[in-house]
Amino acid sequence: MIRIEHLKKSYQDVTPLKDVSVEIHDGDVISVIGPSGTGKSTLLRCINQLEKPTEGRIWLDDMEITDPKTDINKVRQKMGMVFQSFNLFDHKTVIENVMLAPVDFLGKSRQQAYDRGMELLKKVGLSEKALNYPDQLSGGQKQRVAIARALAMDPDVILLDEPTSALDPTMVGEVQSAIRDLAQTGKTMLIVTHEMHFAKSICNRVFFMDEGKIYEDGSPEQIFDNPKGENTRRFIHRLKVLELDINSRDYNFLSVVGEISAYCSRNQIAPKMAKHITLMFEEVMRILVSGMNDLSINTVCEYSEQSEVAELAFSYNGPRFDITSTEDDLGLSILKGLTEKISYEWLESSEYPNLIKLTIGR
Amino acid sequence: MKKKTIGKSTILFLLAAVLVGILIVLKESVICTASEQNDHVIDSLSDLNGKRIGVQTGTSFDASVREKMPEAHLEYYNGKADLLAALIGKKIDAFIVDEAVAQILMRESKYVVYLPEYLDSYDFAPIFPKTRDGEQLRDQFNAFLEHLPEETLEELSVKWFSENEADKTMPDISRLEAKKGVLKLATESGYAPFEYMRDGKVVGYDIELAAMFCEYSGYGLDIIDMNFDGILPAIQTSKCDFALAGISITPERAESVLFSKPNFSGGTVAMILKENAEYNDSFWDSISESFNKTFIRENRWQLFQKGILTTLLITIFAVLFGTALGFVVFMSCRNGNPVANIVTQFFMWLIQGMPMVVLLMILFYVIFGSIAINGVLVAIIGFTLTFGASVFGLLKTGVGAVGIGQYEGAYALGYSERQTFYKIILPQAMPFVLPAYKGEIVSLIKSTSIVGYIAVQDLTKIGDIVRGRTYEAFFPLIAITVIYFALETLVGFGVGRISVNINPKRRKESEILKGIKH
């Protein structure tokens, strides 16, 4: 239904979309997720040409939207859009907001538009507010009106750009349930959202966007439960990652510890956990430095905001050296006291064949 | 709504009360200061050296004062009514006028007298443009003066300088046969008995002489009444063919215009306060006397009526055209067209930075200098430009106050740029724009008061003309102020009604759901 080929959008100093090619099928309900600044909204806005793409082409069925000869206003009439900031017309009542475009573009009589409008307002639970002005509504009510307004044009596809991001937490639910109802009607939808659970519960397809492209495209089960890409995994589990390379026995211990504590406070890791991470790093390094001559270590610390679990991984070169079987009993007992799990692996062909993983729980 | 009307009329009543209060205070203060005892008696011109001497701006009397009384402090006033008020209010010790005027002033005001000694003698003569046509006309005028019997001029001055207004008949200038075309005569009707307004017409010694000349030479006559300051430019740019306005011959003026032979010779005198004048008028008597002089005598209310119409005409057309102009310019600049924006910016800078008087003078004497164009039309053009600039600014602010989300919401539904602007943006901008728009109209009405400079007789100019004739300093001013207030209230009320009507949020339910069964 919508086909996008090599879409690129760049501004003077940033390029949120580098290269996006994807096909959207009739009836797809797609959640677009990803870290902020990765072009999710830009993708949506390019589809209905609120942003002019720098390069690439987009088709709606057989019509090329990006062709300058295409009447974009006609195309937009077939694409509903729901904005983060609602964008209801402040000088019109709720029912007029819903009736306006159908009367102007679908050739409906005012009566027909009114009847259909009231039906849609009833569906989103706002028929009683028909004669109110937008500034008399709460954020959640405004967004539900905006959904009704988009639906009144009976569009082929609805684009929702972070529809709940500007709402009070208490109002998110009412809007989400309106969107959920909409998703069940089988209308093609693209929704940019930060609410993972919500996304998972309504969609049949997920775009994970990162690095200016659709980094991973799959079913909700795949993306949320079994992500393939490293970035996807980190994003889904809300992992915060710190990577350190140590290439000398005389590395600057204080500056490395400083980096770790800065990382901990940046990601609001609990002080106790932060202390444990630092202590563990110290002990492992002490054991490694004492047991090895030519030192080259890569350290990765991952902290999951979701489960509040940290994982430290040390991979290093040299011959097989399993610290769990070292003679340093004191160091080992400290480590064992701090971690939930400690494991060692030997990866024969790797540059850093030794790998130690330590898990710290709550 | 009802409540609002009551509030408005209360305010108006208070306003009127305040104005009457001002009137009383002004009148009383003038009379009080005037009734203080005069310390130094002034008997001759030499007593005036070192004193404050008033002269009218644009006359050549200041030069004679400087020459004869080098110690005197010169003060400049715009008209004889102002000079008289300043003298009575003791802001000056004397002022200089020519003898013929001094006689009239003495008759009109019982507080003043003039010293019989001449400060200077002068010759009045008509002026002509320094062009070939002007020279020809000047020669014709000289020939006419030479041909005129001595007694005729004598009779003319006896008639116009007499006390009896009824004797001062004037030939009907509309009856003149314009065999050789119509001449435009520039004059300033605040200079009785030479030229002044009576029953809505400019009459006087100079005017009758001009009519006699036209009859003799076969011209029609069209009298253009303007501010004295405007007469020289009007002749220099050939806007008018000649001018008779009690213009004395000076070498300086002779550099820029042509003088014919003098048509009147006289002397200037100093007007001073009468000693021990009695100030025993009751307040109400003096008010009713002022009212009578300003409105009733010589049907002067007709002048005011004309002035109001002219002021309204200029205002209404400037508002209509200015709004259209501002809107069109705004629309062509809205989409960021660089050429339109630069041109607009330049003209905004030019028009808004220039004093309105200068803009009008430039339009009248330079841009339309060689075209026979009505001053009212020029005023409408000038004020259309400034009002258009204001409307442009208002629209820019008003439309700028509507958020970007409103555009995006409309585009996303499929509205074109044009439709979005007219259906969504403009209706929301209007409530921002209208209150300031109303203010602009009110200030436009006031700022039209300067059109006297380009020979338009608007309300203010009528006030000046009446003051020049009655020598009433304040009453006509207060009268026109009240009229301006009334006009402004009227216009404000009208625009207020519009803003209620176009505010989309003030609609009734039946309007919103027109034609819908529910």
Image (cartoon, coloured by chain):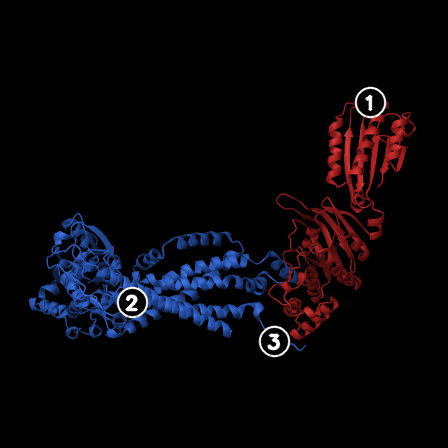
- Amino acid type at circle 2 is Pro
- Amino acid type at circle 1 is Asp
Q: Are marks 1 and 2 in contact (CB under 8 Å)?
A: no
Among numbered discs 3 and 2, the one appearing first in the sequence = 2
**Crowding at mark 1 (Cα within 10 Å: few <14, some 14-19, many 20+):** few
Q: Is residue A322 above or below residue B257?
A: above
Q: Which residue is nearer to you in this view: A140 or A96?
A: A140
Q: Are marks 1 and 2 on the same chain?
A: no
Residue B481 visible here: no
Q: Which mark is residue B481?
A: none
Q: Which chain is red?
A: A
Rendering coords of residue A141 (x, y %):
70, 63
The chain letter under disc 1 is A
Q: Which mark is residue A294?
A: 1
- The residue that disc 2 covers is B476
Q: Are marks 3 and 1 on the same chain?
A: no
- Amino acid type at circle 3 is Ser
Q: Which residue is nearer to you in this view: A64 or A152?
A: A152
The chain letter under disc 3 is B
Drawn colour of chain B?
blue
Q: Quadrant of residue B321?
A: bottom left
- The residue that disc 3 covers is B510
Q: Are marks 3 and 2 in contact (CB under 8 Å)?
A: no
Question: Is the C terminus of chain B in the top left, top right, bottom left or bottom right quadrant?
Answer: bottom right
Rendering coords of residue A289 (x, y %):
83, 24
Q: Is residue A34 left or right of residue B167?
A: right
Q: Quadrant of residue A139?
A: bottom right
Q: Is residue A319 left or right of residue B183?
A: right
> In terms of secondary structure, where does tag 2 sit?
helix
Q: Quadrant of residue B129?
A: bottom left
Q: Which residue is nearer to you in this view: A143 or B111?
A: B111
